[in-house]
Amino acid sequence: MDMMELVRTRRSVRTFDGQPLKAEDESKLREYMREIENPYGIPVRFVLLDAKEHGLSSPVIVGESRYVAAKVDRVPHGEEAVGYSFEKLVLYAWSTGIGTTWIGGTMKRSLFERAADVRDGEWMFCVSPLGYPAKKMSARESIMRKAIKADERKSASQLFFDRDFSTPLTAEDEKLRDALEMVRWAPSATNSQPWRILRDGSAFHFYLEHTKGYTSDAGWDMQKIDMGIALCHFMGAAGGELVLSDPGIPAGEGREYIATVKL
Ligand SMILES: Cc1cc2nc3c(=O)[nH]c(=O)nc-3n(C[C@H](O)[C@H](O)[C@H](O)COP(=O)(O)O)c2cc1C
């Protein structure tokens, strides 16, 4: 599968078939995890956890046997770095038939932090179950998907702009069109899709349009993880170089500059 196909077919998997990961699949995952990099140059450390051994579960997940947790030093842009690297793992897992769900809320955080041995000076924002999708979704999963409209996304004209935030972006070439489409279909916490992209020539500025209610008292911001995921999809399709330099374009109330990709 190419990346577009992976992005368009992936969905959160919350109902697994109860089978443990095959040894061969687990070793491929472990190998891939060790190689993942992100354009922030911030190392993200993945830990595979046995659900039974550590008593790990999530009220929305059924039939999982393993979890993966991602740890990062408490540094600026840690959230975007984890978003980028973890999403690479999510897509890789999907390419081998393994389902995942980003979990940042519906878990007993302290239990997972203990299991993953999160130290002072480290953050662990999210985990994901790992396993093979069951043939049929649980009723709870179906209801949840409907409630958060998980199969829908905002339109391109609501997300992508040219020079100012009132002019929708028209992508002339196919590569850019694909990159934007892959951002559009990225997963985000509660499917809030907070990413906005403003093109200025060959520069693509990424902004976070904050959703009300996502205040963080823990010193980090869940929606910045979504931004890392968007960057992963965009750069995976279009390439480019990541630059952190706010162009100072008036972005409006509630929009925060995150990063620029120069193509
Ligand atoms: C950072 C982040 C945190 C998330 N946290 C949770 C969670 O705690 N529980 C859950 O069931 N889904 C969680 N999700 C999954 C989203 O609800 C899901 O990606 C979105 O609804 C789109 O659906 P899809 O992944 O099937 O395309 C999270 C997603 C992201 C990116």
Image (tube, rainbow, N blue to C red):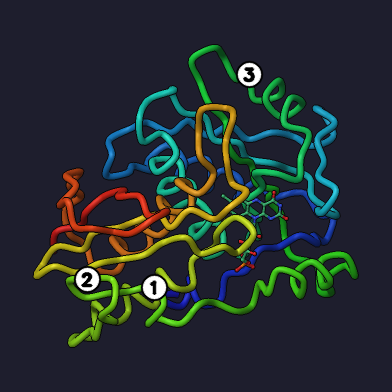
Residue 73, given in percent of the width and then of the height, sits at 43, 23
The kind of residue on which mark 1 rests is Leu
Residue 137, given in percent of the width and then of the height, sits at 83, 71
Q: CA distance from mark 1 to mark 2?
A: 12 Å
Q: CA distance from mark 1 to mark 3?
A: 38 Å
The kind of residue on which mark 2 rests is Asp
Residue drawn at point x = 73 percent, y = 42 percent: 66
Instruction: Give the crowd class for mark 3: few <14, some 14-19, many >=20 residues within 10 Å.
Output: few
Work out whether mark 2 precedes mark 3 in sequence or the reverse, and give the earlier one: 3
Residue drawn at point x = 21 percent, y = 54 percent: 260
Residue at mark 3: 117
Residue 263, given in percent of the width and then of the height, sits at 13, 64
Residue at mark 2: 164
Residue drawn at point x = 35 percent, y = 30 percent: 76
The answer to whether residue 209 is left or right of residue 137 is left
Of the numbered discs in the image, which one, if any, rests on residue 260? none
Depth check, mark 1 against mark 2: the one in front is 2
Give ligand 1's quarter of the image. Answer: bottom right
150 versus 70 height, above or below: below
Q: Quadrant of residue 156?
A: bottom left
Number of callouts = 3
The answer to whether residue 239 is left or right of residue 14 is left
The answer to whether residue 199 is left or right of residue 237 is left
Q: Nearer the viewer, residue 126 or 216?
A: 216
Q: Quadrant of residue 252?
A: bottom left
Residue at mark 1: 159
Q: Seen from this angle, which residue lies furthest right?
A: 139
Depth check, mark 1 against mark 3: the one in front is 1
Work out whether mark 1 precedes mark 3 in sequence or the reverse, and give the earlier one: 3
The kind of residue on which mark 3 rests is Asp
110 versus 3 height, above or below: above
Q: Seen from this angle, which residue lies furthest top?
A: 120
